[in-house]
Amino acid sequence: MFENEEKQLREVRSKLEEFPIPNEQLNDAIQSGFLIANSEWRAKRQKRRKSLWTVAIAAVFLLAFITSIRVSPAFANAIASIPGMGKLVEYIQYDKGLQAIMDNDYYQTVHASQMKDGLTLTINGVILDESGIVISYTLEAPYSIEVLDYKKIELYHNGKVVPPGTVSYNNPNQRHENRKEDIIEVLFLAKQSFDTQDFVLELQLDNEKETAFSLPFTLPKEVKKGKVFALDKVVEVEGQKMTIQEITIYPLRVEVKVFFDEPNSMKILNFMDMRIEDEKGEVWSSIQNGTTGLGFSDNEQTFYLQSNYFEQPNKLYFKFNKMQALPKDESYLLVDLQKQEVIMQPSDGKIEVTKMTQNTIEARFPLAEEFGYFLFFTAENGVGQKVESNSSSSWRDEEYQYSSINFTKNYNESLLKVYFQAYPNYINGEISVELK
């Protein structure tokens, strides 16, 4: 039943032979891989030979080829064709923190599988810390699942759901129509401590049978603790005061908690270049492929950066220079849906509302620089009740950047207030805080 996987691996091997890899490095990796696989086989003799083979292959690539993946796109493509490795390769290429996780053997191979309604869900491996979890998985079916989506994704520990702040996944370009390879990333709502290494992934498909998986898995390694820097450092940029309360460095991300002074005249929307530098000036910049921030109030927000957890620099500095900001009384768009009128918008005149319906607001502004953000965040009606939205989108043409927010149902409201989560207006300063 493993002929297909072995055929794919043989094909990949022929591709890899085209790339120059130091023999010593390759031999060490192969030897290490089979030592790991053999030790696991001795401990669990009942395991099928597929586990022995896949663990050995995974060890080879994780130990030997991470640098090559980042340097050579052709090599990365060859590695990505191995079942379960495609999305990991993409993450390694674009996130320094995840590369360091691989380099330091903090990625944990799992290979737990479950079959339901003819579909097979396999957890290939996991990265877990106190701030969140990244689950590499494969979903296979005897028919096309190219347009399949999910209705529910939840992580359980000790019979209780681990509260999520955000849950994200992609619909990647599939190499095979009957197999999805992707990563589920859960950012926990708050710091989590686990007394056991046993978890359950519950995943419900949005298909005719509403297929539901409840897949238990166990991690062999304990979770590494975050490194906490309690600061309470007050800084000021163009008259706007804020307190850098605490910075915690986890393996997956750096968490920055910021408190904004109530008397500030402006609302800070985004930090454009928040970063951590070492004494050599090496920068660990904002996350490029994940959640950059969570905010539960106007005055207190949490931001996330790529991690440098496994580095041991002599000095560390937290820095930023440029922020998106708007006057507090102009930090939203006020419209009358019944009259199809814009009542209030930022006075700088940068944006123009181009579409207004009972369930959609669309706006645009001239392209002046790269702007990879959605304009709109949340909305409320004239009496302060939250208006539910189900999606936001952003796109551009040759002249303008566009953003829209779509609501879950039609609203026949006289007034609707739509808050900005990003806006092309900036304040600048020179902020540097020494961590150690």
Image (cartoon, rainbow, N blue to C red):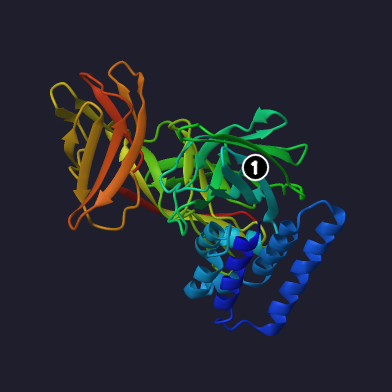
Q: Pinpoint residue 58: horizontal percent, then vertical percent.
A: 67, 63
Tag 1 residue:
114
Q: Pinpoint residue 354: horizontal percent, then vertical percent.
A: 16, 39
Instruction: Relative to 64, say whether 232 is above or below.
Output: above
Horizontal arrangement in the rendering, residue 331 relative to residue 107 (left or right): left
- Picture residue at 51% right of the left edge, 39% below the top: 167
Q: Looking at the image, can residue 377 be seen?
A: no
- Front-lying residue, 93 or 28: 28
Horizontal arrangement in the rendering, residue 416 relative to residue 295 (left or right): left
- Picture residue at 52% right of the left edge, 48% below the top: 142
Which image quarter: residue 7? bottom right
- Front-lying residue, 18 or 32: 18
- Front-lying residue, 57 or 336: 57
Classify mark 1: helix, strand or loop: strand
- Picture residue at 23% right of the left edge, 28% below the top: 334
Instruction: Relative to 342, say whether 362 is above or below.
Output: below
Q: Pinpoint residue 196: horizontal percent, then vertical percent.
A: 77, 38
Q: Which of the image's four quarters has the N terminus?
A: bottom right
Instruction: Relative to 364, say whether 162 is above or below.
Output: above
Few, some or many residues within 10 Å of mark 1 (<14, 14–19, 20+): some
Q: Callout 1, which amino acid? A: Gln
Q: Pinpoint residue 128: horizontal percent, then vertical percent.
A: 66, 47
Horizontal arrangement in the rendering, residue 347 relative to residue 28 (left or right): left
Instruction: Relative to 283, say whether 376 is above or below.
Output: above
